[in-house]
Amino acid sequence: MNKAPTATIEDYLGIIYTLQRDGEEVIGARLAEIMHVSAPTVTVTLKRMLRDGWIEIDEKKRVTLTESGYEAARSVLRRHMLTEWLLSRVLNIPLSELHEEAHKIEHTLSPLVEEQLITSLDDPNVCPHGNPLPGQENASQHWLPLTGFIEGSVAIIRRIHELLEEDYNMMTRLAQLGIQPGVIVQVNANDRANYLFEIILNDQLIQLSFETAEKLFAENLPGH
């Protein structure tokens, strides 16, 4: 039986879970990039996770969660997202700050507090950024990346992907631009050949990188 994961291990589990869920190959270099740590640091942590039975690593150094790792990852992500809702609804913490602040608290939540939060928050299926709680992936399955909309499309932003949440500077920029779940945007330019993606929000023309636009999910505005 695995002992309880440390806060650091929980951080790794959450990222690996998210990448696996999205069908992305998980390797050490990708984890180092996302978590802003050195490759040797990732290597040491992965070896410890392998020893403790949280992950498996194949001959090509691809990382996958074991059954216990999968369950632990679901637990930490659920606690993280519930904490975001608590901070948002009770303390009015801005959307751009939620991820960082919740990260400081999530590891300390007891099962009792987690259950109380689920009840008090009416069992949400997505976090304030629109990302589905573990087991609730159907809530977001019909939303498309902004890059999937043609020029002239009018859409409602529904989700800011977890990997964007990891980039505090980008979250701050999105907040300054007013980009958050629930806002209505029009796709002004979607020209991958020339690496140009633009939206119009509140009569403001905003240029985004394709990497960012691919991690903003939306659905068509009814009637458009």
Image (spheres, rainbow, N blue to C red):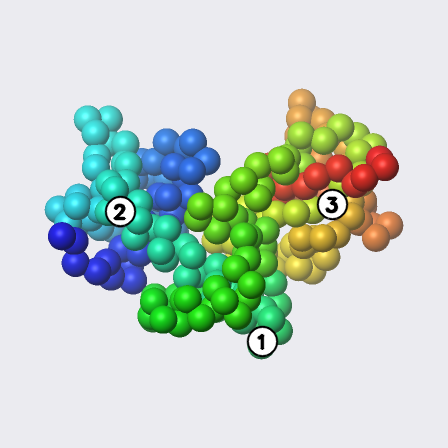
Q: Where is residue 82? Give x, y as percent.
A: 48, 63
Q: Closer to the N terminus: mark 3 or mark 1?
A: 1
Q: Secondary structure at mark 2?
A: helix
Q: Where is residue 206? Give x, y as percent.
A: 75, 46
Q: Closer to the N terminus: mark 1 or mark 2?
A: 2
Residue at 17 percent across and 46 percent down: it is: 53
Residue at 69 percent across and 46 percent down: it is: 157
Q: Amino acid at mark 3?
A: Ile
Q: Which residue is mark 1?
A: 90
In-image side of 215 versus 26 (left or right): right
CA distance for labels 3 and 1: 25 Å
143 shown above or below 192: below
In-image side of 31 versus 171 (left or right): left
Q: Which residue is mark 3?
A: 156
CA distance for labels 1 and 2: 31 Å
Between 216 and 131, the residue placed more toward the observer is 131
Q: Specify the quadrant that holds the C terminus.
A: top right
Mark 1 Cα shell of 10 Å, populated few (<14), some (14-19), many (≥20): few
Q: Which residue is mark 2?
A: 69
Q: Amino acid at mark 2?
A: Gly
Q: Secondary structure at mark 3?
A: strand
In-image side of 125 versus 67 (left or right): right
Q: Residue furthest top?
A: 193
Mark 3 Cα shell of 10 Å, populated few (<14), some (14-19), many (≥20): many
